[in-house]
Structure formats: structure tokens, C-alpha cells
Amino acid sequence: MSLRFNRKKGSNEQAIGRSRGGLSSKIVGVCDAYGRLVDFVLVPGQAHELAPSLQLLARLPKAPAWALADMACDAVAFRSAAEAMGATPVVPSRKNAKEKKPCPGFIYRHRNLIERCWSRLKEWRAIATRYDKTATSYAAGIAIAATLDWFKSSR
């Protein structure tokens, strides 16, 4: 489990950003084939998911066979980074994409694993509502919840 997250100077230091709903944070994560959280990055609520996704992809110890992501990662940068590490990108194209890329449905249907991972982590009320003031303590809470999820799934 990794406790690394963005430590930029300035207002992003605590990974809190202003969006339409107020102050919020995002957790961008990587799951394994069993739907367990492997690594994550905290970003402010208004931040886009592409840059942290590229960062997480680069931090993987070995290349996965498939790199599943949602439409937010439908970018040349993500696809080329996944292909450079030896993974096949499985990202559906956006509606307004000029050049639609193929997305194998038999693999993309497994993307629900990460959604179920977020659901299990957000059963912890402190994770779902971010009770913690600092990004360090919030990341520690996420790491504890993810570790307990690993223990629960290994029975």
C-alpha cells in the first residue's frame, strides 16, 4: 500500500479544492484484478483525473496486461503511456471524439471492480465525507481502510 500523494506547494497542499458542491477532494486509484486498492493519489476536487492517472500508471511495479480507465482518461497521453509500458489501453472514446478508438467490451465490463472498491472504502464514513483536516491523515485513513479490505478479501 502506498501513502504517496501530491505534495505541491501552495493551495493544493491539503488536496482540497473548490468545485460546484463546495470544498472537496478526489481519490484517484489503481486496483488489482480482484478489485483491491493498490495505489492512490489525493487531488483537489476540481482537478482532472488524467495527470494523476498517468502518475499512478508510471508507479506500477510491472505492466498490467490491460489498463482500464473511464472516459476521463480518453487522451493520447494515457493511451501512449499504457502502450509504452506494455499494457493495452481499454478506454471508451468520448462522444465528441474525432477519431474513435476501439474499446473491447469483454474487458471493459470488469471496470466495475474499481467502482465496487470505492463503494467498500466509502462504507467508512470518515473516508466518504473527509473528516480529516490534513491530507496526510486522510491518506492514512484511506490506507487503513484499503488494508482492512485486503484482509477481508483474503479470507
Image (tube, rainbow, N blue to C red):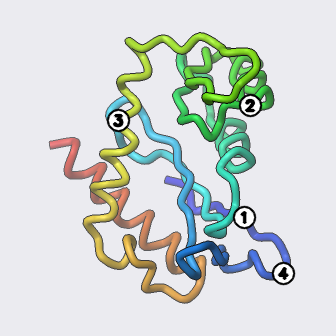
Q: Amino acid at mark 4?
A: Gly
Secondary structure category for the residue under label 2: loop
Which of the marked residues, 4 or 3, is nearer the chain's N terminus?
4
Q: What whole-number distance in Å separates the C-alpha atoms at marks 1 and 3?
A: 26 Å
Q: Position of residue 141 (x, y in %)?
A: 42, 73
Q: Quadrant of the C terminus?
A: top left
Q: Residue at x 62, y 33 (%)?
A: 61
Q: Position of residue 30 (x, y in %)?
A: 52, 42
Q: Is residue 2 above or below residue 97?
A: below
Q: Residue at x 54, y 89 (%)?
A: 133
Q: Is residue 5 above or below residue 40?
A: below
Q: What whole-number distance in Å separates the C-alpha atoms at marks 2 and 4?
A: 28 Å
Return the mark for residue 84.
none
Label 2: which residue? 75
Q: Amino acid at mark 3?
A: Asn
* Crowding at mark 2 (Cα within 10 Å: few <14, some 14-19, many 20+): some
Label 3: which residue? 112
Q: Amino acid at mark 2?
A: Ala
Q: What whole-number distance in Å separates the C-alpha atoms at marks 2 and 1?
A: 21 Å
Label 1: which residue? 6
Q: Are marks 2 and 4 in contact (CB under 8 Å)?
A: no
Residue placed farthest to the bottom in the image?
Answer: 133
Q: Position of residue 115 (x, y in %)?
A: 37, 45
Q: What whole-number distance in Å separates the C-alpha atoms at marks 4 and 3?
A: 35 Å
Total numbered badges shown on the rendered structure: 4
